[in-house]
Each structure stands twice: as C-alpha cells, then as structure tokens.
Image (cartoon, helix red, strand yellow):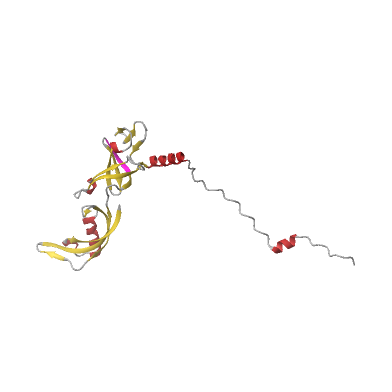
Amino acid sequence: MYYLDHRRDVVRIPPERLGAEVDTVLTELAQQQFEGKLVDGQNLAVTIRDVKSIGEGHIIHGDGGVYQEVEYEALLFRPEIQEVVEGAVVEIRKFGAFVRFGPLDGLLHVSQVMDDRVNIDEHNQRLVGVETKRDLKVGYKVRARVVSLSLSEISPRDSRIGLTMRQPALGRLEWIQEAHKKADEKSGKRPNVPAAKKPAPKPAAPAAAKAAATPAKASGGAA
C-alpha cells in the first residue's frame, strides 16, 4: 500500500554544488539518494518532495562536502503479506507470470494461476488452462494476494514476492466478473434496470386562461 511519511535524514552536498541555490540542490540530491531505495528495511521510497534544510550544515575533516540535515515528505510503498493487490501481467516465463503492482513485480507461479492444469506458451507469452481454456497474457489485469515477501535492500526491483490467484474473488478481472454474473443468475437476481420515467403531468392552466375559455352565460329575464 501507499502512504505519506515525514522523515529526517542527512544529505551530502559535494563541493562543486556548494555555489548553487541550496533548496534546489538539496531536493535533487535527496531524490537521487532516497528514491527507489528501501527505508526501514520494508518501505520503498517512490517520490521525495518538500525538502527543507534543518540548521547549519557540517563538514568532516578531509571531506570537501557539506553534510546537511534535511526533512522531507516521502511517498512510500509497503507490500504486506495477505494484502490483495491489482496489477498487470508484464512477462510470461516457464515457471509462471510476473505481475507488476505499484513499483514492484511479483511472481505468480504456474501452480497459483488457476484451479486447472496450465499449459505454458512462452513463445507467445501465454498461459492456458487445459480444461477451462482460460488464458493469461501480457497486459491482462489481475487481482492477486501476496503470500510470500522478501525485499532486497540492494536492489528493491529484484525483491522476491510470491502471489496467488487460487482463492475466491481473485484472478483475471474478467474471470471475477464472470463469477459474479453466474452467482447472480444462480441466486435469481435480476440485473439492475432503471425504471422507466413517468411522463411529467401537464401544468394546470392559469385562472385567467380558464375564464377566457369558458363561454359567457346569457343574462336572465326579458326586457
């Protein structure tokens, strides 16, 4: 899941950047230093913004740079075990499919794709159920559950994340819609059809118009 976090850290400003506008330099350096990296061992920093310096910078003997404490707002992504995620198939391999959700990829092993034996067509980037004929291709949208998780601090994009679609309400999005439709038909539910609009009643004629439309009666009695 995504969430915002206010954080503090230290950014090193190299000597060649000391003459530039400090806020711009700190923002660029903080983004280079933290974006795409794991923080606290379990959160992937997606975006860094609103970088502000705190107090005076410090120098270290023998180092020409300045070490500046900063505070910033970070958009973090943290996958969790048993979390349900939606993503797109980005690659088909002999052992299954890789699904991209957020900034990370998870492995949908061939045994976790569906309740059916699966044939693998790696050349055409396709997985096909033997009996159901359901298929999974690159670009298809799916809903899956995270069942195993091991994040890599060295290379977060190479983290090992295991997914499954062999549970209720999971799978390719079209399969889920089909299952809902069948369940509605079995329970006798009818699709929601908006009721026909009744014609609006005609507005009543004004009193003056009614008087004009009514013929006048002759006055009674002979002269």
Q: Is residue 135 above or below residue 212?
A: above
Quadrant position of the C terminus in the picture: bottom right
Residue at the limit of the structure toward the bottom, as seen here:
55
Q: Is residue 21 visible?
A: no
Q: Residue at x 68, y 62 (%)?
A: 206
Residue visible at 29% across and 58% down? 4
Residue 51, quarter of the rendered image: bottom left
Which region of the structure is painted magenta? Answer: 88-93
Instruction: Quadrant for residue 129, please give it.
Output: top left
Locate residue 133, reporting x and y percent: 37, 33
Q: Position of residue 168 (x, y in %)?
A: 35, 42
Is residue 203 shown left or right of residue 1? right
Quadrant of residue 64 within the rendered picture: bottom left
**Image height of 209 relative to 93, above or below:** below
Is 164 or 89 nearer to us in this picture? 164
Magenta: main secondary structure: strand
Is 48 one of the magenta-colored residues? no
Q: Position of residue 62 (x, y in %)?
A: 9, 62
Residue 114, percent from left and from top: 33, 37
Q: Residue furthest top?
A: 130
Q: Nearer the viewer, residue 100 or 64?
A: 100
Drawn side of residue 118 relative to residue 29, left or right: right
Vertical placement of residue 115 versus 202, above or below: above
Q: From the viewer's perspective, is 101 left or right of 11?
A: right
Q: Residue furthest front?
A: 187
- Residue 83's place in the image compared with 97, above or below, is below
Can residue 89 be seen by looking at this rendering? yes
- Residue found 18% across the figure and 64% down from its top: 68
- Identify the residue at the far right of this view: 223
